[in-house]
Image: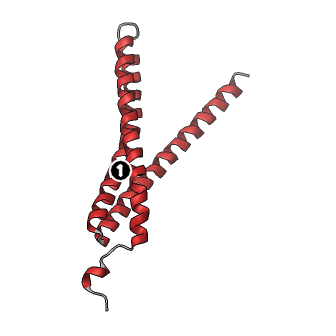
Amino acid sequence: MLDESSKNDVPPVVMEHLRGTRPWVKFCSLAGYITAMFIVIIALITVNKMINYFPFYQTAMLGAFYLIMATLFIIPSLRLSHYEKSITRLMVSNRIEDLEQAIAHQRAFWRQMGIMILILLVIYLFTLAFSAIAILSSQ
């Protein structure tokens, strides 16, 4: 008969897969944060150089664009950080509840990535449609 604690243990194969996944999740999260930081640095340098040569609204729009780009890296990185931390907790506790939390963080990450991909596809479609209209109207 199984005792109460063994019912809550995570199977070793699941633990091994998540243990192998954790370093890559951490790497991707850190890479996203570092990329966002570089985008912000480039934004600051570019806006600083443009401020005296271009109208304020153009400089502000470019700065906003850079900040949006940085945010698009930070948001998934946050999700991955939560996922990585939940895997770390699971490695210590070996409890089903922590596995459920890790899977919930993973689900949230992939849901968000799916939404971002859908938004990108819509932007691409509008860009293609606008380009086709512009090309056809110029003839």
Please identify the residue farthest to the right as the structure is shown. 139
Q: Position of residue 8 (x, y in %)?
A: 30, 77
Q: Foreground: 15 or 76?
A: 15
Secondary structure of the residue carrying tag 1 is: helix
- Residue at 39% in and 17% down: 46
Viewer can see residue 15: yes
Viewer can see residue 107: no
Q: Foreground: 52 or 4?
A: 4
> Left of 121 or right of it: where is 27?
left
- Residue at 31% in and 53% down: 82
Above/below status of 81 relative to 135: below
Residue type at numbered disc 1: Arg
- Residue at 27% in and 86% down: 3
What quarter of the picture does the N terminus occupy?
A: bottom left
Q: Position of residue 88 (x, y in %)?
A: 30, 58
Q: Position of residue 55 (x, y in %)?
A: 39, 11
The picture quadrant where one finds residue 84 is bottom left
Q: Position of residue 100 (x, y in %)?
A: 34, 67
**Residue highlighted by disc 1:** 79
